[in-house]
Image: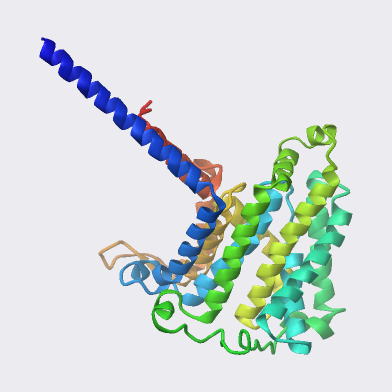
C-alpha cells in the first residue's frame, strides 16, 4: 500500500512538473513572439519562401496553380490592406474612398516616370508623397463629420477624382484608356526588375521585381507594427473603443484621427506606386469606387485589427479573382464527371459565398479564427482541458 502511494505521488509530481514546464515554454514563446524582431524576421522568411511555394514547389504549386506575377501582386495589395486596417480595424473609421490614394499614387508614379525619372525608388517616393498630401486634404475635409457621413464623404471625393481623371485631366491621365507608355528603368541603374535573381535566390524568390516589392512589404509590416505598439497606436485603439472618453481625458481626437487617415493614405500610396511599377500601366479603374470596395472586403475577410489578417484576405481575394476565375470546368475529384461548365465565370458568386461563410463562422475573419485556434492549443498545452 505504501509503495503504491509513493508511486502515485511521484507520478503526480512528475505530471505537475511537465505541466509547469509546458506553461513555461508557452510563456517564453509568447514573450518572444511579441518582439518586433521576431515579427519582422518571421515576415521576411514568409515573404522569401512564398513565391517558391506558390509557383514552383514540386507538389504544392500543382495544387495552388499560382504564378510569380500573382505572388508579387498579392504583396502589393497586402501593403494596401495593412494600411487600410490601421484606419478601419484600429481607429474605427470606415473609408469608402481609399481608391483615391491607391489610384492617385499610381497616376503620380506613372506621370513622374514619363516626365521626370523612371527610377523605381523615385516613383515610389513620388507616389507616396502625393498620397500623403491628398490624404491630408481629404482627411481635413472629411473628418469634420463622423460615422456614415465620413464614409460617404470619402466616397464622394474619390469619385470626383475618378471623373476628373476621365475627362478634365485626360491630358495627364490618358482618360478612359489609362496611363500607358510607362517604362521603368533598372533598380539602382543595374538590376532589371523583370530579370531573374542569380543562383538559389532565383529559385526561391524569383525575379528582382518580387525582391523589390518584398523588401518594401517587410518594411511596411515593420512600420505598422512599430506604429501599433507606440503611444499613437494606443490612442488609435482608445478612439475606436470610445471616442468621447478619449476626448474626456484630454486627447485631441480629431488630430489623431487625421494622423491615422494620413498614415493609412501613405500605405495606400506605397502600394499604388508599386502597382504602377509592376504593371507599367495605370487603368482608370484604379480610381473607381469598386477598388475601395475591394480593399474593404479584403480587410474584413482576413480579419480587422490584426497585422497579418488583411494580407491573408488580399491573398484569398486575388487568388479567387485570378486563379479560380480561369477554371473552365468543375469536376468530381478523381473522376471525369463535370458538375459545372464555365465555372470561372461564377467567381464573384464563389467569393461572396466564401465571404458569408467566413463572417458566419469566424466574425473576426480568417486571422481571428487562427488566433482562436492558437488560443485553444495553448490552453490544451497548459493543461486546461475544459
Kindly give the residue lying farthest to the top in the view shown.
1
| Closer to the camera in the image, 52 or 63 | 52
Give coordinates of residue 173: x percent, y percent: 78, 81
The picture quadrant where one finds residue 128 is: bottom right
Give coordinates of residue 69: x percent, y percent: 51, 76
Q: Residue at x 77, y 83 (%)?
A: 111
Give coordinates of residue 24: x percent, y percent: 40, 35
Q: Residue at x 76, y 66 (%)?
A: 100
**Number of numbered discs present?**
0
Q: Residue at x 74, y 58 (%)?
A: 263
**For residue 252, above or below residue 40:** above
Residue 328 visible (yes or no) = no
The reply, left or right, for residue 299 in relation to residue 6 is right
The reply, left or right, for residue 214 in relation to residue 380 is right
- Quadrant where the C terminus is found in the figure: top left
The picture quadrant where one finds residue 97 is: bottom right
- Quadrant where the N terminus is found in the figure: top left
Colour mapping used in the image: rainbow
**For residue 306, above or below residue 185:** above
Q: Residue at x 73, y 71 (%)?
A: 103
Residue 228 visible (yes or no) = yes
**For residue 288, above or below residue 5:** below
Give coordinates of residue 368: x percent, y percent: 52, 44
| Closer to the camera in the image, 298 or 257 | 257
Amino acid at each position: 500500500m505504501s509503495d503504491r502511494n509513493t508511486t502515485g505521488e511521484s507520478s503526480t509530481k512528475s505530471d505537475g512538473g511537465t505541466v509547469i514546464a509546458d506553461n513555461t515554454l508557452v510563456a517564453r514563446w509568447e514573450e518572444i513572439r511579441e518582439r518586433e524582431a521576431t515579427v519582422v524576421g518571421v515576415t521576411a522568411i514568409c515573404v522569401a519562401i512564398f513565391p517558391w511555394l506558390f509557383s514552383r514547389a514540386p507538389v504544392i504549386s500543382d495544387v495552388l496553380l499560382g504564378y510569380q506575377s500573382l505572388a508579387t501582386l498579392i504583396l502589393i495589395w497586402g501593403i494596401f490592406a495593412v494600411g487600410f486596417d490601421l484606419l478601419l480595424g484600429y481607429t474605427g473609421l470606415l473609408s469608402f474612398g481609399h481608391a483615391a490614394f491607391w489610384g492617385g499614387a499610381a497616376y503620380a508614379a506613372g506621370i513622374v516616370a514619363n516626365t521626370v525619372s523612371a527610377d523605381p525608388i523615385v516613383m515610389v517616393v513620388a507616389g507616396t508623397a502625393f498620397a500623403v498630401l491628398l490624404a491630408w486634404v481629404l482627411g481635413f475635409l472629411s473628418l469634420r463629420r463622423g460615422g456614415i457621413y465620413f464614409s460617404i464623404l470619402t466616397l464622394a471625393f474619390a469619385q470626383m477624382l475618378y471623373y476628373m481623371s476621365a475627362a478634365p485631366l485626360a491630358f495627364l491621365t490618358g482618360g478612359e484608356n489609362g496611363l500607358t507608355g510607362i517604362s521603368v528603368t533598372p533598380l539602382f541603374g543595374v538590376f532589371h526588375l523583370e530579370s531573374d535573381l542569380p543562383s538559389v535566390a532565383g529559385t526561391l524568390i524569383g525575379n528582382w521585381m518580387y525582391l523589390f516589392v518584398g523588401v518594401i512589404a517587410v518594411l511596411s509590416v515593420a512600420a505598422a507594427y512599430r506604429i501599433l505598439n507606440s503611444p499613437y497606436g494606443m490612442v488609435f485603439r482608445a478612439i475606436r473603443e470610445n471616442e468621447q472618453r478619449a476626448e474626456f481625458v484630454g486627447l485631441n481626437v480629431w488630430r489623431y484621427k487625421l494622423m491615422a487617415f494620413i498614415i493609412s493614405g501613405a500605405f495606400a500610396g506605397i502600394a499604388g506606386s508599386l502597382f504602377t511599377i509592376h504593371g507599367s500601366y495605370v487603368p482608370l479603374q484604379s480610381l473607381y469606387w469598386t477598388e475601395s470596395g475591394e480593399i474593404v472586403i479584403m480587410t474584413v475577410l482576413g480579419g480587422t485589427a490584426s497585422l497579418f489578417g488583411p494580407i491573408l484576405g488580399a491573398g484569398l481575394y486575388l487568388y479567387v479573382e485570378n486563379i479560380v476565375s480561369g477554371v473552365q470546368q468543375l469536376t468530381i475529384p478523381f473522376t471525369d464527371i463535370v458538375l459545372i461548365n464555365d465555372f470561372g465565370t461564377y467567381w464573384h458568386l464563389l467569393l461572396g459565398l466564401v465571404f458569408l461563410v467566413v463572417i458566419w463562422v469566424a466574425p473576426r475573419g480568417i486571422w481571428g479564427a487562427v488566433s482562436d485556434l492558437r488560443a485553444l492549443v495553448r490552453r490544451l498545452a497548459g493543461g486546461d482541458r475544459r
